[in-house]
Amino acid sequence: MKAVVMAGGEGTRLRPMTASMPKPLLPVVNKPIMEHVLKLLKRHGLTETVVTVQFLASLVKNYFGDGEELGMELSYAHEEKPLGTAGSVKNAEEALKDDAFLVISGDALTDFDLSDLIRFHRERGAMVTVCLTRVPNPLEFGITIVDDDGKVDRFLEKPTWGQVFSDTVNTGIYVMEPEVFDYVEADASVDWSGDVFPRLMEEGKPIYGYVAEGYWEDVGTHESYVQAQADVLEGKVDVERDGFEISPGVWVAEGAEVHPDAELRGPLYIGDYAKVESGAEVREQSVIGSNVVVKSGAFLHRAVVHDNVYVGPQSNLRGCVIGKNTDIMRASRIEDGAVVGDECFIGEESIVQGNVRIYPFKTIEAGAFVNTSVIWESRGQAHLFGARGVSGILNVEITPELAVRLAGAYATTLKKGSTVCTARDHSRGARALKRAIISALQASAIDVRDLENVPLPVAREQTARGSAGGIMIRTTTGVPDSVDIMFFDERGADLSQAKQRKLDRVYARQEYRRAFPGEIGDLSFPSSVYDSYTGSLLRAVDTTGIAESGLKVVVDASNGSAGLVLPSLLGRLGVDSLTINPGLDEARPTETAESRRAGLVRLGEIVASARAAFGVRFDPVGERISLVDEHGRIVEDDRALLVMLDLVAAERRSGRVALPVTTTRIAEQVAAYHGTQVEWTTTSTDDLARVSRDDATVFGGDGRGGFIVPEFSSVFDGAAAFVRLIGLVARTQLTLSQIDARIPQAHVSRRDLPTPWAVKGLVMRTVVEAAGDRSVDTTDGVRVVESDGRWVMVLPDPAEAVTHLWAEGPDEASAQALLDEWAAVVDSAGH
C-alpha cells in the first residue's frame, strides 16, 4: 500500500515560525514533524509515499529528497494553488489509482498503529476509513459519530459547545480506495469532511470510523507545538530520539559538549554539536537544537531553541520558541509564550514580554522592552562601528561572510589599485578572518601587503608607509570569544567618524565594487618589518643616556605578539634586560583582568629578586603597557599615567599634554608645576590621536595603559612608550617609586549604570537640569564641577545600554558620596 503525506499547508497560526519555514519542517525534538511521520509510515511498511506540497515546496523537497536516507521512496505532487484536503490528494491520483492508499498529515505528531487501521479497513470492506481519536476539547476539530460496528453516522466540522455530542474527532488520517477519486473534482478546492464524505454518505457508500489508541497532537498552535516537545521528552509518544540518555530524562546527541558544571534537570534534549557552558542551567522540557551555544549563567526552562542559536551569558528563556540562526545577547529575557523568528538579533539586557511575536530578520536594540509584536519594522543596528572598530562574537556576530562584505565595502571607499596592509593577532579566529578579508580586497582591485601576525602598533606604523589604509583583526581585550576588525586610514590611525559613516553607507547599501579579471589585486608579504619599525622608533625617540646608565629592566611579553618585536628592539637599545613569556600562545590571544593581575604580581616578584630598575608588561597585541616599580610593587594604570606625565613634563618644560576628561585633576597640577599645559579631550582614542598630531603636543595617555609618544606616532604604542620611559628614567636617575611618591594621591571613582537606549537622551537632560548653577563642562558627556573643586562626569556609552559615571574628591569617601548622589539622578531619569 502507498501513502500520501499532506505537506502543503501554510501553518498561518504558527507564524512567525512558519513565515520562512513550511510547517512540516518545524522541528520536534530536533527532527522535522514530517520526519517523525515518515518514520511512522516506514515502521508500518508504507515505504512508497507521495508528498503533496504547495507552500515553500522547494524547502520540503530539498530536505527529504527522494527519501533514500530514510529508506523510503518519495515522490512529490505540486499544487500551483491551494486545492483543499481532497483536491491535493486528487492531484496525486496518477500515483495512487491502482490500490488502496493511506492519507496522513505531515504536521501532526502521532504514534498510532497504522497496521491495525489498515486491517480494520480491509475487514470492513470500506471505501473510506476515518481514523478517530478522543480529545478533551473537540471544538477545534471535526466531530465524528460511529455506530457499534464502526460505521460513520454523522460528521460535524468545528462545532460550538452547543453542538458537541462526542469527544471522538477526525485526525485527518484516512485509508481510502481509489474509487473515491470519482467524487473529487479535478483542479478545484475540495475538502474531505465538508464536500466528499457527505456525498458518500448520501449515496450509502461504506465509510467507517476507526477509534485509535495512542498519541496524537495536531501541532496547529504555539501552545500545542511546545506541548508536543514536552510530550516527546516525557515519553508520552513513541518516536525516535537521536543521542544518549546520560541521566534520567537528559538526552544528549552526538558531538554535544556539556560542561560538568552545567546544571541539567530533565526531561530535556541537547542537539548534536551544541555547547552548554559551565554555570548554565537547562531545566525541564527544554529542547536545544544543533550547534546551539548556551553561555555561562544562561537559564532555560520549557524553551524550544532551533539550530545555530547563540544564547548569551545571563540570558533567561522561559516557555518560548527561538528560531534558527538567532543571536540572543547577554542578560536578555524572553518570557513565556513569546516566539522569535529565524535570523533575529536580540540585543543585550532587552526584555521580550510573554506572547510577543518577533518575525524573522528583525533586530531588537540593547535594553529594549518589547511588549507588542514586531512584524514589519526591520530595525537594523544604527552603526557598525563601536569603540574598537567592528566588534562581536566570533562566528556569531562576526562571521567570514560579514568580514568579506566589510572588506568589500572598505575597498569600495578606496581607489582601484590602492594598497591596504592587513595584520592579525596570534589567534586562530583572526587568522581565518584575515584570509577572507584578503580575498575580498583583491577581488575589489586592491593590492594587499600582508604583515601576518604583528603587534598592533607595528601594523599602524607599516600602514603609514605609503598604504591607503589597513585592516587589523584581533581578539577583543578580555573577551576571548570575540574579535575586533579595526580599520586604519593612510596614517595608520583609526578611521575618522566621517570615513566610518561612508563605510557604513556602502555596507548598508551593499554597493560593492568588483574588479575585472585583469584588475585583481596583488598579494605581497613585506620582509624586515620589525627591523624597519625598530629603526624608525629609535631614530624618533630620545635614547641618550640609556647605554651608560647600566639600567636593568624586566620585560613581560605576556605570550603575545609584542614578543616578536622585542629581540630587535632590546638588542639595539643596549639595555640589560630579562624577557619573560616571549612565546606565542594561540590558546590565550587575550587576557582577563584576573590573569593580567596575576601576571603583574609574578613580574613584580622577578623585578624585586633581580634588583631591576622596573618591570614592564605588554598587552598581547603590544598596544598598552603596565608598570612595576623597583620594589616589585604594581604601579596602577592611573598612577602610571601621572608618573609618565611627570617625567615628560619635567624634561620638556613646555608644550601640551593630551588627556581624556575622565583623568584626575592632579594631572593638571603636575603639568603646571613643570610648565606644560593639559588639553582635555573626549574619551575617544581618535580624539587623543588628533590632539597628539599637533607639533606642540609632547605626551598623551588614557590612564588605562595607553601612551602616545608624539615624536614617533599619534597612536597608542607599547614599545614606543617603553623606549621613552627607559630614556627618561636613565636621564633623571630617579626610581619609579621616588617619582610616584612626589605626586599627590588622586581619588577618582567609577560606576556603570544600565540605561535603556530609549531614555539616554532623557538621562542627559536630567543631569544638565540637576546641575543648576554649578559649572558644567560638555567636552564629552556632562562634567559637573562643584564649588569646592569636586567633580562628577556622566557619559552615555555609544555602543551599549549603559551610562558611565566618574567622580573625584579629596578622599575616597567624598568621591563615593558624589558618585552615589549623581547615580541617583541617573537612576531617577532611567526609570
Image (spheres, rainbow, N blue to C red):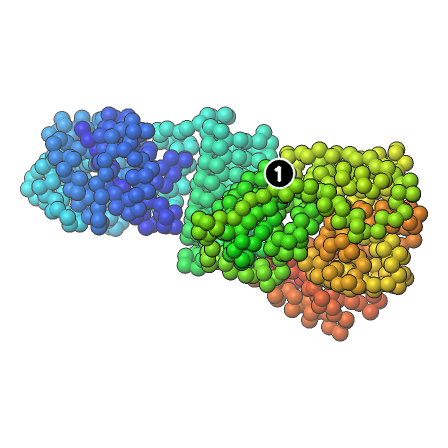
Q: Secondary structure at mark 1?
A: loop
The residue at the point 81 percent across, 51 percent down is: 541
Mark 1 sits on what residue?
Answer: 427
Whole-percent x, y for residue 578 in the image: 82, 35
Answer with the quarter of the image where residue 37 lies. Answer: top left
Using the rendered view, name the quadrant where residue 135 is placed.
top left
Q: Is residue 307 above or below residue 12?
A: above
User: Does residue 628 appear to the left or right of 138 in the view shown?
Assistant: right
Split into 4 quadrants, where in the image is the C terminus? bottom right
Q: Residue at x 73, y 52 (%)?
A: 716
Residue 575 in sight in this render: yes
Q: Position of residue 294 (x, y in %)?
A: 54, 39
Give the quarter of the image for residue 631.
Answer: top right
Question: Would residue 384 appear left or right of 601 to someone viewing this image?
Answer: left
Above or below, comparing residue 136 to residue 692 in the picture: above
Q: Residue at x 27, y 49 (%)?
A: 161
In the displayed structure, would residue 601 be above or below residue 695? Answer: above
**Foreground residue, 119 or 614?**
614
In the displayed structure, 561 sits above or below 377; it is above
Q: In x, y percent, where is residue 394?
A: 56, 43
Question: Mark 1 belongs to which amino acid?
Answer: Ser
Q: How many marks?
A: 1
Quarter of the image containing the N terminus? top left
Q: Residues within 10 Å of mark 1 (few under 14, many from 20)?
A: many
Q: Which residue shows up at 92% across the image and 53% down it?
A: 742
Give the camera-side residue of 279 and 744.
744
